[in-house]
């Protein structure tokens, strides 16, 4: 925890998800709302089956969902959302023929229902 889900339309030019994921992880950690960097888990999905508006071909999107354990106040969630949106603006390559919608959505995972364990590497005998 937290989890970052990055979804983006496949019409973005020169968009490479790994540096964007790294930049988002760094921005989230820099907020000070996450104590251990390895608690951040992020993944990306390029969407080829999508529709924006009524089908305009000059539109694209990048949508970031951040799942946080419940219990954080509104100011914390707003700060995380704002900082990741700023980072996303800096990480997006310039698009000459596309209008790109950038979105950040904060989701809560119920702390009482969230399970996690860490499995250490097995010893080699």
Image: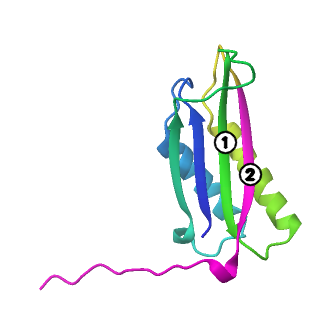
Give the image location of residue 31, x and y in percent.
73, 63
Check residue 58 for magenta coloring: no
Residue at the (66%, 47%) spot, across then down: 64
Q: Is residue 34 left or right of residue 47?
A: right
Q: Crowding at label 2, few (<14), some or many (≥20) Cα neighbours within 10 Å?
A: some
Give the image location of residue 75, x and y in percent.
88, 65
Give the image location of residue 26, x and y in percent.
60, 57
Q: Is residue 34 left or right of residue 106?
A: left
Return the residue at label 2. 105
Mark 2 lies on a secondary structure that is: strand
What range of the chain is rendered magenta?
A: 100-125
Mark 1 lies on a secondary structure that is: strand
Whether label 1 touches label 2, CB < 8 Å: yes
- Residue 11 position by quadrant: top right
Total numbered circles: 2
Residue at the (70%, 75%) spot, across then down: 110
């Amino acid at each position: 925890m937290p989890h970052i889900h990055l979804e983006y339309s496949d019409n973005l030019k020169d968009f490479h998800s790994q540096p964007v994921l790294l930049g988002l992880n760094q921005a989230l950690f820099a907020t000070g709302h996450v104590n251990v960097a390895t608690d951040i888990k992020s993944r990306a999905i390029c969407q080829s089956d999508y529709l924006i508006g009524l089908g305009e071909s000059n539109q694209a999107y990048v949508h970031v969902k951040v799942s946080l354990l419940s219990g954080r106040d509104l100011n914390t969630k707003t700060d995380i959302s704002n900082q990741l949106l700023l980072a996303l603006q800096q990480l997006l390559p310039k698009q000459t023929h596309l209008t790109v919608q950038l979105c950040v959505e904060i989701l809560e995972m119920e702390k009482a229902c969230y399970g996690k364990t860490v499995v250490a590497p097995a010893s080699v005998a």
